[in-house]
Image (cartoon, helix red, strand yellow):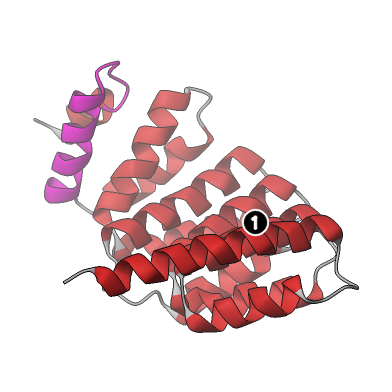
Amino acid sequence: MTQDHLFQQLKHPNPHLRERASLELAETRDETTIPRLIDILGEEDVTYRRAAVKALGVIGPDATMPLVELLLSSKNVTIQSSCAKGLTQIAVNYPDVPFPNEALQGLKTALHDPNPVVGLTSVMALGEIGVPGQDILIETLETTDNVALAVAIVNALATIGDSRGAEILTALVNDESADSYVRESATSALSRLDLVRNNSRQRP
């Protein structure tokens, strides 16, 4: 299949055909593939846009910096959140490939975007990146006044499941000056984190 045909397949109503097209695009890509996929991130067609995000996630590390650059330079919330979702997909698909520091710093900047959707999708990406993104999440949690962002970070720390995150959540639960909703979220996140860690200990 030609690249043009594969791009058309990304719009197909059948999710299996879209997924196959994503994999083929990653396998047969040339220097135009990543820029063409990135151009789709502002499309109104949600199916097409999500398929492009998935395809960029399959392509992986080579798409990281183009996504970060667009995340920071665009003023379009749909494009920005699609970029953050693309970075999340890369972290899911390539857990053993370290994220470049510039990408982490780009996500740190995006956490403070005036649009809350951009901040929340960036938290999701950093949570999926895991321990390398954890310091940024903790630093933001300790300095932000944005309750929704703080709650998202609390949940991301629980997902990462690291002991440092557990310490931060425990301190937050015991901090009577903290926002009550954030404290409640930290309490439930902490019990979830304990569950994750206990399960991983019990595996052979």
Figure quadrant of the N terminus: top left
Residue 100 location (% of width, % of height): 42, 77
Report the residue that reaches farthest toward the right. 177
Residue range highlighted in magenta? 10-29
Q: Is residue 13 above or below residue 78?
A: above
Q: Tag 1: residue type?
A: Ala
Residue 24 location (% of width, % of height): 14, 40
Secondary structure mostly seen in magenta is helix
Q: Residue at x 55, y 63 (%)?
A: 191
Q: Is residue 173 above or below residue 156?
A: below
On the picture, is 30 further left or further right than 151? Answer: left
**Front residue (pair 39, 131):** 131
Mark 1, Cα crowd under 10 Å, few <14 / some 14-19 / many 20+, is many
Q: Residue at x 39, y 27 (%)?
A: 48
Residue 78 location (% of width, % of height): 60, 38
**Front residue (pair 119, 79):** 119
> Is residue 14 within the magenta segment?
yes
Q: Residue at x 63, y 71 (%)?
A: 108
On the picture, is 115 further left or further right than 193? Answer: right
Secondary element at image label 1: helix
Q: Is residue 21 above or below residue 179?
A: above
Residue 56 location (% of width, % of height): 33, 49
> Is residue 129 within the magenta segment?
no
Which residue in the structure is indicated by mark 1? 152
On the picture, is 131 further left or further right than 71? Answer: left
On the picture, is 33 further left or further right than 160? Answer: left
